[in-house]
Amino acid sequence: MKTTDIKYYLIRGRKLAKREDGYHCYLFKDGEWFWDEKNVLNDRLIGYDSDEPDDSPYKIGNSCVMNEIEELTFEEAMRILNEKTIEFLIRKWKEDLLEAKPAWNKRPGWPAKSVETSFILNGMKYTLVPEDLDLTDDCWDQGLMESFQGILREDLEQYGATSVCNSGFID
């Protein structure tokens, strides 16, 4: 059985990247890994500075460029990957809820309380509450979140979450 050697990196303190088997490079965006077609990771690793003239001795091996990258442990990489995935999903859900909220406010379905969605992503446990989705602690906003919990479950599972548990009580 072949194992893949994977190293994780953080570029400029915000962009997650990985290198598989020493040369396949990927960048993480919107909950997914994408091939690093512009060689962002490799350029940082060798200190390639595209702004330097072609005949410059500082074009490769530039320590300023090399200092823009930090190697991560697997645990650090998974924490950042989880944060970025959850941030992406929350942005998506906020947009969905923004569209649905006016109709809900006009004719709310039901009041609820203690609404939350908990899940495990890459071995780490998280819990979402209405405030995470820009909803208030008001019983009607909690009812709106409860009505969306099926969508939350589907999306979370699509992005690798396990043990998704939706809970809440009709008020």
Image (spheres, rainbow, N blue to C red):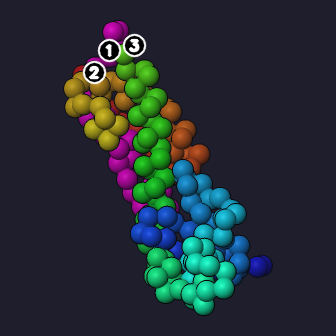
Q: What mark, if any, has residue 105 been given in the picture?
A: 1
Which badge, 3 or 2, comes first in the chain's sequence? Answer: 3
How far across and how far down the image is residue 52, in percent?
A: 58, 78
> Magenta region: which residues?
104-130
Q: Is residue 75 visible?
A: no
Pointers 1 and 3 in contact (C-beta within 8 Å): yes
Q: Quadrant of the C terminus?
A: top left
Q: Residue at x 46, y 55 (%)?
A: 84
What amino acid does circle 1 point to? Asn
Q: Residue at x 44, y 50 (%)?
A: 86
Q: Residue at x 54, y 41 (%)?
A: 155
Residue position for label 2 = 140
Q: Secondary structure at mark 2?
A: helix
**Labels 3, 2: front one:** 3
Badge 2: few (under 14), some or many (20 or more) residues near its Cα, within 10 Å?
A: many
Relative to 144, is 31 above or below? below
Relative to 126, is 99 above or below? above
Q: Secondary structure at mark 1?
A: helix
Pointers 2 and 1 in contact (C-beta within 8 Å): yes
Residue position for label 3 = 103
